[in-house]
Structures are given as structure tokens and as C-alpha cells.
Image (tube, grey):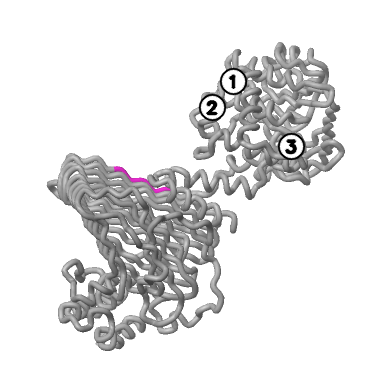
Amino acid sequence: MKNRTPLAQSYLDRFETAVSTLPGHESRSVQALRRQGLDTFAALDFPHKRIEEWRYTNLSALTKATANEDIPSSDLDVIQTAALDAPFEMVFINGHFSSDESRLKELPEGITLGSIASSLGNGAVFSLSSEEDRALFALNTAFMEDGFSLHVDDHVQSETILKITFRNESGDQNGRHIRNVINLGIGSKLTLVEEHTGTGSYFSNPVTSISLSEGAALNHYKLQNESHYAYHLSLTDCENAKGSIYQNFTFSLGARISRNEIKTTILGSEAESHLNGAYLMRGKQHCDTTTLTEHKVPQNISSQVYKGVLDDDAHGVFQGKIHIFRDAQQVVGDQLSKALLLSDRAGVDCKPELEIHADDVKCSHGATSGELDEDALFYLQSRGIPEDRARKLLIEAFLADVMESIGDTPVKDYFNAIAASWLTEA
Amino acid sequence: MLEIKDLRATVGGKEILKGINLTIKPGEIHAVMGPNGAGKSTLSYVLSGRAGYEVTGGSVLYKGVDLLDMSPDERACRGLFLAFQYPVEIPGVASATFLKTAFNAQRKFRGEEELDAMQFLKLVRKKTTELGIKDDMLKRAVNVGFSGGEKKRNEVLQMALFEPDLMLLDETDSGLDIDALKVAADGVNRLRSPERSALIITHYQRLLDYIVPDFVHVLADGKIVKSGDKSLALELEEKGYAEISAA
């Protein structure tokens, strides 16, 4: 008899009810997929610190029996600021698509956006899969309820910004197992902004699968601004075909414990994968960024740049792996992780990892953590700038180059405004 | 303007200033000269309020008010300006943003209206033209990639912008060629007025050819051991510190 975590056991206990009520319950293939997910999850349980990839992130606060019992009555801490002006927005409330809240009329031609709940209702599982290795992926497969399904036709190049908002609040024990699927056709282009926000205590477990066809380009932004009592454990997988470009920028401010795990697999030459991000954490927040970039074929480029600002007892984790397969010659891979520690108690764990089986490649990695430059602080103060303003200037300066990597100006302005509000609250 | 009485200070537990007495009246330029390790830079940092320099005794009155009680930014807002020996590089902060932020912080402190970006740019252009400084450095990050001379010019530009009442120059001549030295001296001389004072801290007499002081003091082992007029600087140059300090 296996000693399961209480939360895992409760998912197992709930499964039979779930499989007969969740979207697609009438479809045998959906049921089969869910069972497959459940079996995998049952064998794995939640990730724990004895698993190498989870050494630095402890989920016991989530998985213990008393989890979610200390739900605060009032919401607080979520940074509120000017909204992003996006012409189209799809809204999910507590994990369910809300047509009333969404603005999706007259989407540009060639862009198809639907809800996963309706796909599941139709028994359409061809674009969904389970996973053998990752427990959270499997759990999502077993309990997925909704999410978005996005398809962009070949050669459709949209200049508009599509925003997907997930608003959560504390409530039932099921968690929010959002499943998203993105397919970009040949030579197509899109800018997508995901925003996760909420109040109270809840467990969000979104899984996003992206497939970029030849020459497709996706600018994918994610704002993780969950409630400070929430758990946000997300998985994003992207497959890059020849000449495609994936640019991901993840901006994390929320959640008690969060993990952004991104896996990109480069399957074509002249493809690019750029994973960038910033995280601003305080209190007892914990933010884990884990990336895996696989170069399977020659002649392509990848980069990862992450910058974190950690105050109070906050903790950051960066694990970045670049895996270059034997035939993947002439690959360029660069990685950089920098953390700024604003308190003696804040800390960061960094694990850069290069696994290179080809001999003609260019790879670099670097990880640093440090405090604010006291010399610079004094220099600014000696010119009349008050200390708090001087600190703010220096933190903004620390973040400046990674924020500058945001290619879409409205998104850059939006994220910078949020960063400024975060700094003002300090 | 400035009244230093029996000032004692330690750095990392070690006493560096061992009882400094110095009075600077409005309009006066004083030079403090001394060998390496005499406490010259410590004096400038104590006066400007840098953390890590602990005052263990004595007092400093600035315009009749206790200077040591003020934060570094308040000192600056009240008209004290330290020209750094080694101006600090600050990646990611644009010079123009830095100058405007500092300038407006000082105006705000004094209850004056802040300048907008256009008004400020106009003012900076005027100052750079007067001083013969290229304004392309405004677009770059503060002091990043600047040559030694450019960094000192940047200090002079700031001094011209802020129009301080008391200028502290910490080894401004170190690492400067003669042209840069002249720009720096010109910056100070332009600001010379009956209401403004300066304290020039230097190892060499060279800068004093261009900024002629009213008084010269010799600092040795944390104390002022000799004071005189500008001729003392020449005497020092000739005889060296050892002889003067021993005298």
C-alpha cells in the first residue's frame, strides 16, 4: 500500500464522480484519456523534493491534509494597475469560459478560438495527450475542465493582441486544471497575452501545448498575478518547426508558490526559441522557473534570460537546461539568470545545465545573485534623490534590459506599469 | 558656511579622522592636501553622509545646522555637492533620467516647481554649451563606459546644474589630462561667488594652479597639522609631505 499525499488521495477518491460529470463525460475517448492521466498520476503522486527537478520547490504546504484550511477571508496583495488595451479578450472565471465577460466578436479572419470544454464535449481529443513522466500534466489530463483552443490558419499574420484572462477565487477543492492548445499554421504570426489573477486560496494547474508550423511566429506573454494565497504550477510545451520563432516572456508577481515550467523542442533548422522573464517576489512567496530547451536538429538558436527581485523571505529558483542532441550541429544557446536580493533572508537557487552531444555548438550560461549596489545608491542619494526613490531607480535599472526584450510596446508598457506599482508598495 | 569641530570618525572600527577643526566662510575656497592614507577621502565621505563612516566625536555645522544628522540626499538638497573621486557607473539608468530626477528632487525639497522634460533639456543644453561638454552622454547610462575624463566632466555638469552652495571636490584631478583638468577647474570657477564656498581635497598641487584657494590645510594622520595661504601648496610641492608634517 502506497503512502500517498492527502491531496493526491483526495483526487483519486473524487475521480469516478469527476469522470462522469466533467466535460466529455459521454465520450469514451475522453474517459479513456482521463483514466490514463489518473493512472499515471496515481503512480507518481505530487512531485516531491527527492525528485531532482523538484529539489528546490516543496509542495508539502499544498499536498498536506490541512491545505487550504487557512483561507483568509479578505483578498489582498494582487497588484492592480491600468489594464492592457487588447482588442480581443477571452475570459475564464474559476476555470470556466465566460462568454459574457469575453470580447471575441469579429476576431480577425483565419483565427479560430474555442473552449476546450466544448472540444471535450464533442469527444475531440486528438490534440490532447497524457504524459508518462510529469505528474502535474497527468493530473491535468485526468481533471481538465476547460481552457482555450487556438488555431491560426496558414499565412495569417495578425497585428492585434489577443488576451486570455483567468480569474480565480477560492472555492471548491478541485483546483483549476486548465488545458490550452495553440496551433500556428505555416508562416502565421500572433501575439498572445495570458493573465492569471485571483483572490483567496486555490490551486491552479494550467497546461499549455503549442505547436508552431514552418515559419510561424508566436509572441507569448504570461502575467502570473495570482492571489498570494494561491498555488500556480504551470506547464508549457512548445514544438518549433523549421524557421519558426517562439518568444515567451513570463512575468511573475503572484502566488504563494509558483512554478513556470517551459519545455521547448526545436525540430527544424533556423528555428528560434527565446524564453525570457522577470519575477518580483516578497513576503514568503516562492517562484520557480524551470526551462528545458531541446535542440534536436542542426542550425537553430535558443536563449533564456530571467531576472528576479526578491524581498523579505521570498525565494526564487531557476533551473535551465539546454539539451543539444547528437546531430544538432551549429546550434547557439545562451542562458542567463540574475537575481537581486533586497533582504538578507531572501534567497535564490540556480541550476544551469548544459547537456551537449554535438561538437560544433556555441553555448553559454551564467547565474548571479547579489544585493543592490551600495556605491550606486550613495551616488544617487548624494545628488538629492531620496533613498526609497534611489532604490526604485536601481531596481528598475536591474530589470531594464529584460523588460526591453518585450517586443510588443503595449505589453511592455503594461508590464512596466505593474513593476512600478510593485516597487511603490515596497 | 561650514564649521567642523574636533571631528572624529572611524571606518571598520579604525579611527581615521582624529579631531579635525576647519571653518569655511561663504565665498572662501579651502584646499585640504595630504599624503595617501591621511584621511582625505574619509573627510569627504563623512561630510556627504556615506554609510560605513562612523562619526565618533565632534560636530559639523552647515549653515548653522547639524549636518551629521541629515541623510545624504537632504545634504544635497540643502546645497552640498560632492564631486566624486571615482564617479559610480550605474547600468540601466539613463543619464538624462538621473539628472532630471535629482534636479527635480532638489527643487521639490526647496518647495520649487519641478521642471518638465522639455524645460529640463533646455537647461541641460545651456549648461553643456557653456562648459564645452558634449551632450551625447545624456543618452547613455550614468557613467557607463565613460572615460575617466568624461566621468569628471559629468561631475562638473552636475555641479553646474545643481548650483550648490558648498562644493566638495574629492581628488578631482586624479587621472585627468590637462584639458579635462581645465574643464573641471572652469566648472568650479564659474560658480565662484561671495555666497558659495568650496573644499578641494587633493594630493597634488596641480589643480590649485587653476582653482586658486584662499586657504590651504595639510592633513596628516587624521589631523590638520598646518594651515596657510596658497603659498603653502607650493611649499608642499617642493618639500614633500614628510617634512611639512614633521615640522
The residue that appears at 24% across and 40% down in the rendered structure is A362
- Vertical placement of residue A378 versus A65, above or below: above
| SS at circle 1 | loop
- Vertical placement of residue B33 versus B44, above or below: above
- Tags 2 and 3 on a common chain: yes
Q: What kind of residue is marked 1?
A: Ile
Location of mark 2 (residue): B137
- Snapshot quadrant of residue A137: bottom left
| SS at circle 3 | helix
- Vertical placement of residue A1 versus B200, above or below: below
Q: Horizontal and vertical percent for residue A288?
A: 39, 61
Side of A284 relative to A182 (left or right) = right
Location of mark 3 (residue): B47
**Quadrant including the C terminus of chain A:** bottom right
**Real-space Cα distance between discs 3 and 1?**
28 Å
The residue carrying pointer 1 sits among few (fewer than 14), some (14 to 19) or many (20 or more) residues within 10 Å by Cα, namely some
